[in-house]
Image (cartoon, helix red, strand yellow):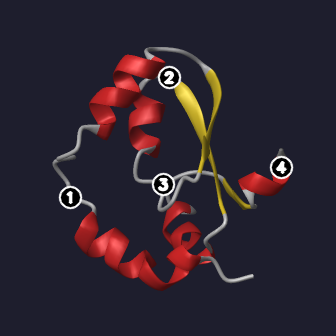
């Protein structure tokens, strides 16, 4: 199965994601998660760009996404699995 995001994975990784986090995802993760430990599953992890923030809070990030294109990048950042979260529930 080819996911819609497969076609934009390169653009997403190299052009869309800004290094300075302009929409504040890192700050939101810090507020919502706080410090902790144990596994933290990111459903729809995309390229795994937020794994380092999750790790800095003390958690072990794990990622799941349907897009093989996005997971090519994510596998460098966190343990991943290709799965359809919609089918899991």
The residue beneath circle 2 is 58
- Residue 48, labelled with which disc? 3
Q: Earlier in the sequence, mark 1 or mark 2?
A: 1
The quadrant of the picture occupied by the C terminus is: top right
Real-space Cα separation, disc 1 to disc 4, in angstroms: 31 Å
- Residue 88, labelled with which disc? 4
Real-space Cα separation, disc 4 to disc 3, in angstroms: 20 Å
Real-space Cα separation, disc 2 to disc 3, in angstroms: 16 Å
Real-space Cα separation, disc 3 to disc 1, in angstroms: 14 Å
Residue at x 82% of width, y 56% of height = 87
Label count reads: 4
Decide: is 19 above or below 24: below
In front: label 4 or label 3: 4
In front: label 1 or label 2: 1
For mark 2, does the 10 Å Cα neighbourhood hold few (<14), some (14 to 19), or many (20 or more) residues?
some
SS for dot 2: loop
Residue at x 52% of width, y 61% of height = 74
Cβ atoms at labels 3 and 1 below 8 Å apart: no
């Amino acid at each position: 199965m080819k996911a819609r995001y497969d076609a934009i994975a390169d653009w997403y990784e190299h052009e869309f994601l800004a290094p300075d986090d302009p929409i504040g995802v890192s700050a939101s993760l810090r507020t919502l998660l706080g410090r902790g430990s144990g596994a933290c599953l990111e459903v729809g992890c995309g390229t795994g760009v937020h794994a380092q923030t999750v790790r800095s809070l003390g958690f072990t990030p794990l990622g799941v996404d349907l897009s093989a294109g996005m997971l090519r990048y994510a596998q460098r950042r966190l343990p991943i699995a290709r799965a359809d979260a919609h089918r899991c529930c």
